[in-house]
Image (spheres, rainbow, N blue to C red):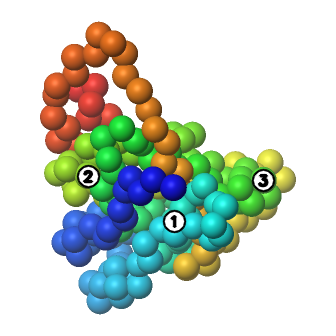
């Protein structure tokens, strides 16, 4: 198997900034504890394609609600690959948990963005039967799969990424 990427934590400063934006009432010492407890994504078995991103804190979502989770994770990816994020199969199947953008696309140059390539997950509980979704801290919430991609023969893209979501079309 080809090794094409490496997961890392973003800096504490970047995590703290993004966490406080999403959860402004979190005490400073709690943010530090959350950051220190972050786990890098891992595959569960040798046959798994997906790397499990775990919840940094307990997440409880009523049906129809959404939440933005700063993962504290970034990915250094070889140029010919992309990281795609999907809900964990069991959460999608049982609760219709979805990513707000349906599939997260983490480009290789996102690593160099001004936010350090901080991977965010905006989750939705789209339960049709009113079920509350709970994901415990440390439990898998989304999975990331590395996929090779190609470009067209006449591709001349040469712009440098600076931002995150939506920045490549501004």
Is disc 2 placed on a helix, strand or loop?
A: helix
Label annotation for residue 93: 3
Q: CA distance from mark 3 to mark 2?
A: 31 Å
Label annotation for residue 138: none
- Where does residue 126 sit, x and y in percent of width and height? 70, 49
> Label 2 near label 3: C-beta < 8 Å?
no
Q: CA distance from mark 1 to mark 3?
A: 17 Å
Q: Compared to 163, does 58 lie above or below?
A: below
- Where does residue 10 sit, x and y in percent of width and height? 27, 67
Closer to the chain start, of discs 3 and 2, is 3
Which corner quadrant of the image does residue 125 belong to?
bottom right
The residue lying toward the viewer, choosing from 153 and 68, is 153
Q: Quadrant of the C terminus?
A: top left
Q: Residue furthest top?
A: 154
Closer to the chain start, of discs 1 and 3, is 1
The residue lying toward the viewer, choosing from 76 and 54, is 76
Q: CA distance from mark 1 to mark 2?
A: 17 Å
Q: Residue at x 22, y 22 (%)?
A: 157
Q: Nearer the viewer, mark 3 or mark 2?
A: 2
Q: Nearer the viewer, mark 1 or mark 3?
A: 1
- Where does residue 123 sit, x and y in percent of width and height? 55, 54
The residue lying toward the viewer, choosing from 78 and 170, is 78
Q: Residue furthest front?
A: 1
Q: Compared to 154, does 21 lie above or below?
A: below
> Label 3 near label 1: C-beta < 8 Å?
no
Q: Compared to 126, does 62 lie above or below?
A: below
Is disc 3 placed on a helix, strand or loop?
A: helix
Please rate how many residues cluster around mark 1, counting C-alpha atoms within 10 Å: few if below 14, some from 14 to 19, many from 20: many
Instruction: Return the residue at label 1.
Output: 53
Instruction: Return the residue at label 2.
Output: 111
Closer to the chain start, of discs 1 and 2, is 1
């Amino acid at each position: 198997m080809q090794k094409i990427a490496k997961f890392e934590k973003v800096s504490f400063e970047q995590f703290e900034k993004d966490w406080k934006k999403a959860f402004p009432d979190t005490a400073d010492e709690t943010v530090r504890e959350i950051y220190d407890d972050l786990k890098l994504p891992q595959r569960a078995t040798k046959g798994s394609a997906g790397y499990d991103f775990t919840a940094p804190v307990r997440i409880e979502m009523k049906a129809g609600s959404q939440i933005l989770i700063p993962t504290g994770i970034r990915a250094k990816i070889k140029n010919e690959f992309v990281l795609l994020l999907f809900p964990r199969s069991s959460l999608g199947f049982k609760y219709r948990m979805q990513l707000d953008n349906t599939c997260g696309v983490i480009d290789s140059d996102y690593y160099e963005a001004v936010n350090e390539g901080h991977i965010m997950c905006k989750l939705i509980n789209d339960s049709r039967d009113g079920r509350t979704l709970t994901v415990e801290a440390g439990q898998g919430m989304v999975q990331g799969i590395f996929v090779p991609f190609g470009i067209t023969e006449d591709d001349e893209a040469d712009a440098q990424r600076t931002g995150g979501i939506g920045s490549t079309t501004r």
